Amino acid sequence: VEACAAVVGLPVLPKHTRKFLLKSDPLASVFSQNGVRTSTFRATKTFLKHAPQRDTSMSYALPQSPSSYSNHAYVRKRISEEGSDSYQYSEVIFDGNERHERKRRISKREYELYLRDADPERSPVEQSRLHFLY
């Protein structure tokens, strides 16, 4: 969205997300008893051996100087509490103090192909997230 807005000259609003690391696993019943609706999902992030290249189709959204950033890419599998899966490919590029991230949804087949390029020196990251619905 930000890349499209930049191309057509629209302002981009900052995205604010609040995340908290909990000391213990909260009981869903505690929230539901108090009228707080929640949703949970699990995610696995697998880092890839090959970093993204600058000559991608969205290169206009990247920094101009290639010398000062470090790239990485990963794929993510998200499983909701209903059991539905979704898959995502992400590229992250650091330019000085700025972090540029591009994400796109991918199919299960693409996800499995990307897993063949998993970085053996980096362990997959397993996450469990609890969302408060409002």
Image (cartoon, rainbow, N blue to C red):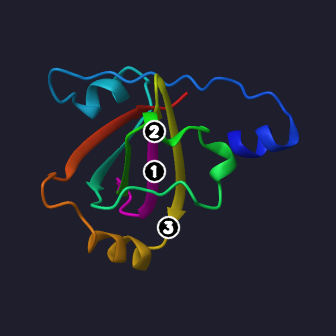
Q: Is residue 1 among what the camera can see? A: no
The answer for how far apart the CA atoms under marks 2 and 1 are is 17 Å
Q: Secondary structure at mark 3?
A: strand
Please provide percent x and percent y for residue 32: 36, 29
Residue 80 shown in magenta: yes
**Nearer the viewer's eye, disc 2 or disc 1?**
2
For residue 62, above or below residue 110: above
The stretch of residues the image draws in magenta is 78-93
Front position in the image: 74 or 86: 74
Q: Which is the main secondary structure of the residues drawn in magenta?
A: strand
Q: Is residue 27 left or right of residue 97?
A: left
Residue 29 is marked as none
x and y, in percent, of residue 114 in the image: 35, 70
Separation of marks 3 and 1 at Cα, in angstroms: 13 Å
Mark 1, residue position: 91
Q: Nearer the viewer, mark 3 or mark 1?
A: 1
What residue is shown at x 45% (from left), y 38% (from top)? 67
The kind of residue tagged 1 is Glu
Q: Secondary structure at mark 2?
A: helix
Tell me if residue 8 comes above or below residue 107 in the rendering. above
**Which quadrant would residue 64 be assigned to in this image?**
top right
> Would you say the residues marked 3 and 2 are in contact, meaning their CB atoms lie under 8 Å apart?
no
| Amino acid found under the numbered disc labelled 3 | Ile
Q: Residue at x 29, y 49 (%)?
A: 42
Residue 79, above or below 62? below
> 33 or 134: nearer the eye?
134
Residue located beneath label 3 in the image = 106
Q: Name the residue carrying label 2.
A: 67
Image x and y of residue 26, in percent:
22, 27
Q: Are marks 3 and 1 in contact (CB under 8 Å)?
A: no
